[in-house]
Amino acid sequence: MSRIVGVDVGGTFTDLIILDDETGTVKIAKVPSTPENQAFGVLSAITEGGVQPASIHTIVHGTTVTTNALLERKIAKCGLITTLGFRDSLELGRRTRPNPYGLTGSFECLIPRERRLEASERIGANGQIITALDENDVRKAAQRLLDMGVDSIVIHFLHSYVNDTNEKHAEQVVREIWPNDFITRGSAVMSEFREYERGTTAMINAAIQPVLDNYIKKLRNELKDRGYVHDLLVMQGNGGTVSSKLISETAVNTVMSGPASGVMAAAYTAKSAGYDNVITCDMGGTSCDVALIKNGIPQVSSELEIEYAMPIHVPMVDVRTIGAGGGSIAAITPAGLLEVGPESAGAVPGPICYGRGGVQPTITDANMLLGRLNPEIMANSDIGLDKIIDIFTKKISEPLGLNSPEEAAAAIIQIANTKMAGALRIVSLARGHDPRDFALFPFGGAGPLHAAALARELGIPKVLVPARPGITNAVGCVVADVRHDYVNTINKSLVEANMEEISAIFTEQETRGQETINAEGIEVEDIIIFHDIDMQFQGQTHILTVSVNKNITKRKLHDAFASAYWNRFAVELDEIRPVVVNLHTAVIGKRKQVELSNLMDIKMRTNRIEKAQTGARLVWFEGGRTETPIYNREAMPLETTLQGPAILEQSDTTVIMEPKDNMYTDIFGNIIMNIDTEITK
Amino acid sequence: MSSLDPVTLAVIQSGLQQVCNEMDLAFVRSAFSPVISEALDRSDGIYHPENGDLISQGELGLPVFVGTMQFGTKCVIERAKNAKAGDVYIVNDPYLGGTHLMDVRFVKPFFYQGELFAWLANTGHWPDTGGSVPGGFSASATEVEQEGLRLPPVKLYKEGVIDKEILSIVLSNIRIADQRIGDIKAQAAALTVGEKRFEVLLERYGVQTVKQAIEELRERAAQQMRACINDIPDGEYNGSAFVDSDGVVDKPLEIKMKIRCEGTELYFDMSDSSPPCLGPMNSVIATTRSSIYLAMKHIFPDVPINAGTFDPLHIHDPKGTFLYAEYPRPVSGCAAEVSQRIAEAVFVALVEAIPNKLFAAPAGTSGNFCLGGVDPEKDRPYVMYVISGGGYGGSNFGDGISNGCSTIGISKTTPIEVMEQYYPVIFEEFSLHEGSGGAGKYRGGFGVNYKIRLQRGEARASMVMDHGRTGPLGVLGGANGGVNRVVISQNGVDYIPPHLSKDQDIEVNQNDTVRVSTPGGGGYGNPCERDISLVQSDVKRGYYTELQAEELFGVCIDKSGKANIVKTNKKRKILIENLEKPRDE
């Protein structure tokens, strides 16, 4: 009876996956995204998938509605009521500049100054009420904002993370006259100190809340009209889903929904295949997202900055983005050095080989020139290899004095790989993890093209290429659990901390999560709870997070922190007192496990590897061109081995296996590559 | 020398960069000093084994350390006897290639296969190194000894083991010593991280190739800087910038910058600047040079940084001026303030030559404010620092940003919620300094106002700021930015520091307040050319009053908040006719 649909709206395509538990079938659909109203793309993907909405049990949706709204500033008209004397905090920020060098650049606050108003009230750092709230100020301010045509409102008071009395009181007053539910209270979104970060997070929430609410309502109605009777679930940046009935309250949680679902899919797929420790590398057209999964759990961070001076401090899967994608442009700097990205040819005009008017050499063109991509994709355009060779010669190999355009292409690939390797080092080595203890999990259209070389560069012995690298985000939607995160600031030295109080806060956070899951009414098989504590040594400002159980003793917490600190920084600090900063609880409702072994069409599969071979071509690997067999990946049998070099083609990506490596296909259809790491040692 | 292939070159370049970035990251995440962990007042780099030339530096290192660290490392190399693997030198002597005493440098020889391959070094700003006032910014010091403990290069670690005797000398001479051990360990551990990553790079590419790449990268950085300079028309350009006072004698200090451009080379001459001063606004030569380097890097941000970048910049030693300080001149203000005035002089000199690339003067002060006392409730002494930003100058790219950080820094300020947790104060205001953005076609950004009330006990306040006398310069017809102001209300009576921006040991009692307003950025271009709708929106936001809109921009706003075009055209015509007259803030 159970038919689950995962649908992910990306920048270019809307991907859909339908899992049918009963028949064990998997269907996939890909349609162009419809940026003006993403719902059209979602609906046409469902149509394309060939199922009736009435027959679907659950739809899980990954959306970029809020991300786009924010980045393109197509946001709601919102207003702010804040503590007297502080209406400019959110505009002034914490005194930086957009780039370390160069004194130009701009910053626009999401709420312009005339819509930021104040009310007399003040809470002290210990939570004492210094000035009681002046209700009249609030009422007048709210009315003024309404008169200005404001849709959504933020109430953000100093020190509300320790005492939210005034903030709650103001919310009540506003509710009396506010015509809708778009009221965001700072400490309700995030009960953590640092007024700029908390206020900005709340402001972002308010700015995108009406946009998301409007979109979700439309989509729900459309689905309902077509006969879908169940709840729509929405993917959040923390890698968990939430009921669409609740999502607009905490709209800010959806901002990084796309990258998070990809990482969740990776965690799920890799774990099923027996790999708990994985580094993911999602390479698409313009950028590459890198994340780390330890013991099957993606690393989560609460310190993301979505663009200059726009921190979002809610827990999100810790994804690091760099500007290296298939469309990244190669150019020569005035110093005569070859540079790749961050400029991108985007989807239009795109790489030269797409035949849409692109004239700049890109990573994709380099792969094409080296024989790694199938030249047939150029068949329908008037672009041929000769054109690419010509551009590479004039723009890269001649100015650099290289012997051939091939050398230029190889150089572009190597430089892009070096950049990506740098990002992989930052998520692993710089955080105390040795990449050699991990497997690399490439996905996105371009990830599997570069994975073998990246793994070799970092000494990573295994690469796991999932069955459907191009639709990993949609897969993430169907495997993700329900998840709610809570945080409270304590900020007391460990010596002074009351462990019973800590345990009580954890219990309260747990209860909130369980109640929320109940209210959502989503079917879950089990509820799992994680507690983390952010800690630091007295006097520090950065934090280190340790996982704990909720009744941890002081001694054990002390030791756990000391050992985490040693692992990260190789420093012991017996001299200094640790401080308990924030308490986090993640409440996860496990959804029913789904079967991913049918992601590839069984009908395509053959019983002998030879039958899967579609041809051969000369492919360039380090040292020159080698005759390389080409396989149709979907036709490859399970549990087969193959020695490199080989190119595996499938509809959503191309996998490259280099000469010294070998691979096997596991029972789920994943490819496990063994990388010859001799040269990296 | 056979040329290295461009791929290996680019890969090694980013490899060296990553080594430094990881040192930066390890240092900042584990440091205790908020000046390091939040204000990012630190830098890590790799230096040439024999002459200390800069090979690579972390991308997020404090700009003012760009040039100084190579001079500092050179001084250590000259004095280092018998350096062994695992040794770490500590040094903060300003006259040995430094800045001020608070910037403590760790320098470590890096051996590979038994050979000294390079030096790894980092600098971190410690919150205190002793001296007459907490924090080291004594506005009235007349000798370096009053500013704190001065360390020549000595081995703090010997073959990996910390020298407890030297450590105890250091810790016995500074305030809040208990937390410094954390910074010392973090600073040394960052260099160890660098060592490990550098080894991996060398294993991968080999000693010869990496050496060759380093040479070639140096050449290419020089080449790129020269290509940029080539776009500056040949000629002589002059600019002046003024430091309010030296903190002791109430008289402005002038930086007279003469820049001669000849083809691909720039020659900097500051020898007509003011003589050495009595107070702490002297600059050591390493800082003076570095200030010019960072100014050029701000103008041409795309040029990569290594020693080659500075080859085409020829700086004449300004001996006999306050920009060439010798022992025992006090120097605490050089890194935070004088350096920014030097950069400002470079900007205003070159703006005539390359107006499209340049901007009007930024606020250019670190705004150091310090309050020290005993909190009677906690019965504990405290030292609170506030640094603040100001407006940036307008430019051909648009208006300047508000509350930008100092020219030489990349700092974040400490949240008010954090400060109120630690210190017996309450902030009553943190707001935009209205009207402070210099008028212009592209206006300057705005400074900030903050007001602190002492909740309990008594305390003493000190400050080293600047631009109290004249605002940051506007260019090409733009007006100056608003000035820095400090008002201390003692028992209801306002006290304004005689030197405006520098003072120390001001008495602050319970319920007294301190209000600081920081400078706005200079305006760029004639304000009468500013888009009328932008002025309208500036007024709507309360950035300027209606009167200011009329007087400064010639835009007449009527009661509905809209500009009256007829009146505006008339007013602008009058303003343009009066353009020759200098305009005061």
Image (cartoon, coloured by chain):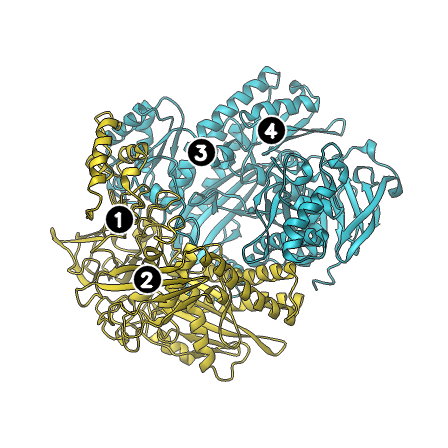
Q: Which residue is mark 2?
A: B342
* Residue A559 visible somewhere in the drawing: no
Left or right, residue A397 beside residue A168: right
Which one is closest to the eye, mark 4 or mark 2?
Answer: 2
Q: Amino acid at mark 4?
A: Ser
- How packed mark 3 is, by other alpha carbons closer than 10 Å (few <14, some 14-19, many 20 or more), is few
Q: Which residue is mark 4?
A: A33
Q: Amino acid at mark 2?
A: Ile
Alpha-carbon span between mark 3 and mark 4: 19 Å
Residue A334, x across and y down, in percent = 54, 55
Q: Chain of mark 2?
A: B
Left or right, residue A621 beside residue B376: right
Q: Chain of mark 4?
A: A
Chain identifier, yellow in the render: B
Question: Tag 4, which secondary structure?
Answer: loop
Q: Vertical placement of A570 versus A264: above or below?
A: below
Residue A674, x across and y down, in percent = 76, 54
When asked about the image quadrant of residue B559, the answer is top left
- Residue nearest the observer in this picture, B290 or A468: B290
Q: Which residue is mark 1?
A: B481
Question: Tag 1, which secondary structure?
Answer: loop
Q: Which residue is mark 3?
A: A73
Alpha-carbon span between mark 1 and mark 4: 48 Å
* Residue B9 visible somewhere in the drawing: yes
Alpha-carbon span between mark 2 and mark 3: 39 Å
